[in-house]
Image (cartoon, rainbow, N blue to C red):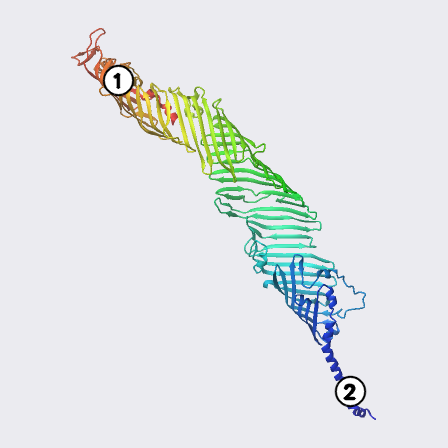
Amino acid sequence: MNEPSILKRHWPALVLCFTTAAALTGCLLLMVYLYLPKLATDRLPVAQIRRLGFADFMGRISRIGLFQTAAGPVVFGHVDQAALSIDSIVIDYTPGELRRKKIRRLRISDVTVNGALGPNGLAFPGLDRTTLARQAPIDQSGSDDVSPLAGIVVEQIEIRSGMVNLTWHNATYKIPFEADLKPAGTDATKLDVHLRLYPRDQPLTLVAQVDVDDQQARVSFDGPAIAMDRFADLIHLINGLDATGQVTVQTEAVLTWSPLRISNANVDLSWSSGRLAYASAIIEPERDGTPAILSAVSEDLRTWQIKVQGVALRAPAPLAMNRLAATVNLGLDARDVSGKAELTLLPWSIEGPRPVSMKNSASLPVTFDVSLKASGEWAGAFSTGGNDPITRSDPLDITIAGASILGGVPRFSLTVKGDGQGGSADWQFDLKKIRATADGAVINLPSADARGALYFKDEPDGTAWNGHARVRLASPVFDAQEMAGQLDALTLSARFQKQGRHASVVDARLQCANGRFHHQDSGLRLSGGRLDLPFRSDPKATDSQGTFSVAQVDHRKSKIGGIKGRITQTKDSYTFTATHDSSLFPGMTAVLAGNVHINDHGLGDADLSFQIPPYELPAESDLGRFVPAAKGVALSGTISAQGHGSLSSGGFRGDMDLGIKGGELRMTDPKITVAGIDADLRFPELPRIRSGPAQPIRFARAAMGGIVVDGGRFDVQVESKNTLFVEKGRLNWCGGKVETQALRITAGKQDYQVSLYCQRLNLSRILEQLGTVNARGGGTVNGRIPIAYSDGRIRFDDGFLFSTPGETGQIQLTGTEMLTRGIPSGTPQFAQVELAQEALKDYAYSWAKLGLISEGEDFLMRLQFDGKPVNPLPFVYKKEIGSFVRVEAGAQGSVFQGIGLDVNLRLPLDQLLQYKDMVNMLQ
């Protein structure tokens, strides 16, 4: 039988077999498709996952196919609050790829990570980190139980729609993320990981190149233009902190996980268009549009090289950090930071009642070194410029309430050290070439330096500290509009301490050496000035006394004397006493006393008093020693003075009394004398040079040339340092009274007019003093004598004196030869004058008149009488010549019943008064 026939005969059976096999295979495949996901789900390593620390685990494989497997949800932890939950996992492959243990793509979506940040760090719900930490690594190198997943290569892993829910301070913050993982090339042990985070819609990217065999990853992090405003609520969790602007972050590092280590870290951060504020401090990028830069590099996370540039402190004082380079060492036993910073003091101003500003910028290089040991010991050193000199093109230019201060860039150093029980600090500060100007005053200071130290220690009843400080100004020189001076040095030194809860104790002293001062206008000079001013917080303690002195006070070329005093600090003031020993007047001593009040703000109001006890001037003391123009003028008598003053915020106020008793003023050439001078002058408005009104000046006798005044009084007022107001005067002259009208005398003024009002002056005494004749007799005259002073000369302007109406008088004049001087003898004119001379030798008059007037350089005195000679005159009348002629001695003369006389006396005025040198002295 042939083969076809056999097939034909068995065909139905074969079809039935194949159909049955196909049905059985289909049923088997259907059973596998439906049951395999459940079987795979049941074989998930739930126990191993729980041993990792998760309180629970739930996972489900929903579908297994020839080209795709799907799973989800997968929950690590409790279902209601899981540490990690995944809604969907999709695995893409082909049967051929599965046979080669290869998966084309793993897609994970809707991933939620829940965490909480607390005092103990980051925690995940349903995950016990201590259980995870106790797990020993599983070594499968010698095990025959090899996982069926071993050796499978996943070409790409995608994580989409991820969300991190982070709870912190009772608030939950959501951070969306997504990630991509893929092998690097054909090597399945190397992965490229891209993680993208979107906190507050700000894109952050983390890229990692993972090498599984080397157990390390190179990680980079990039955050471009992060808007800090989006994180304002987090920033404000720190009380008083505010930050704005855009920050760009770029970091790189190598992560090794066996053992866990980070190396080759590199952080770059730039910040622009914003500000960082905390309390009163404000920090900004140095220049608008130019970001501030921070970079940090470390090979092992223990030693960091840090650089910062372009940062500026705007408040409380503007300061730019142009560049900072520092090394940070984070060792196990110690941590230290060292480096250099280039700082710039920026222009600034403070408005207020006393505005302060700095007009220009100043470079300030700073070096620093700070360390902290695990034992608790710490130390630090800060200095400007190290050993290098600080140079700059412009000095500091600071203005304080209108006062300008120019100076070099300061140099300082600060060294600190200590431990948990206490510590110490040493500091010093130097400043060169300081110049200050204010209201026309200039102060030049070659240098200023300060030194100090502070020591502190914890005690059972609180912190105890003590220290000392010293500030020294070397050779300060000042020049004001009226005053100039210089000191060798001005030093402020202090010691201070505090014990626990007790009040602090301060012991300080202000000292200056060899002060020299010069008041240019007055010619006053002070030299050898010294000051030792104490300050103690407890004035009752010992050594609360100081001293001050001036070795020599000079006035122009005159040596005045010295001053020595003591200063005592009391509870609320400084009191001082001093004595001045005069070099001008041997034996004269002036006593000064006062106090300066102390308040919460420092020194307050001050009170001053001085007294010169009655002192008898040496005989014939020459005033030329004080006033050069008064050379040859001598003064004697007993002088005294006293005064009081107060200095407050309103200025200086005071009063002074000056007096002289039994004084005598004498000039030898010309011969002028004023004796019996008594005067009391009160100045109630110091520092204003103005006395009280009607200050009396009395004298017993005055003589000027042949003119003698028998005492008098002037009521005066010093209106200013340039003006003297004579309110009135009364003189006793020639047996009568002379009163003066008010007169204001001003320095530099050359024109004055005054009238003398005369009452009952003895005529004979007037003629004797003014006319250089010998006169006797009775009879008085009254009248007015106008006197003018102009351009250094005195003139009589038509003055007249007349006898009292109804009163007669008698006068005897001799020595009148001047009347005939220059008249030829034998002439009728000579005979007439000679007759008048004889008549005036004894003349009784019914009225008299005396005229006083200046003519050119001469003084003209015109005498007019109406009366008769008491005795016959040796003259007879001759008709042939029409005049009287003198008769021989023994011959009978003529009796005159009445004769009127009109006589002119012409005298040189300067010689008469001898006033010129006195006038020059007063000018």
Q: Badge 2, how many Cα within 10 Å: few under 14, some, many 20+? A: few
Residue found at x 35% / y 25% = 714
**Quadrant occupied by the N terminus:** bottom right
Tell me residue 462's x, y (percent). Answer: 63, 43
Q: Quick one: label 2 or label 1, which is nearer the N terminus?
A: 2
- Residue 445: numbered disc: none
Q: Does dot 1 land on a helix, a strand or a loop?
A: loop
Q: Which residue is mark 2?
A: 17
Q: Amino acid at mark 2?
A: Cys
The type of residue carrying mark 1 is Gly
Asked if residue 833 is positioned above or below residue 513 in the image, the reply reads above
Closest to the observer, 559 or 169: 169
Does 34 appear above or below 323? below
Q: Residue at x 73, y 79 (%)?
A: 31
Quarter holding residue 719: top left
Residue 110, image x, y percentages: 64, 69
Residue on which disc 1 sits: 779
Q: Is residue 800 above or below residue 39?
A: above
Near mark 1 (Cα within 10 A), the count class, few <14, some 14-19 or many ≥20, is many
Residue 330 appears left or right of 792: right
SS of the residue at dot 2? helix
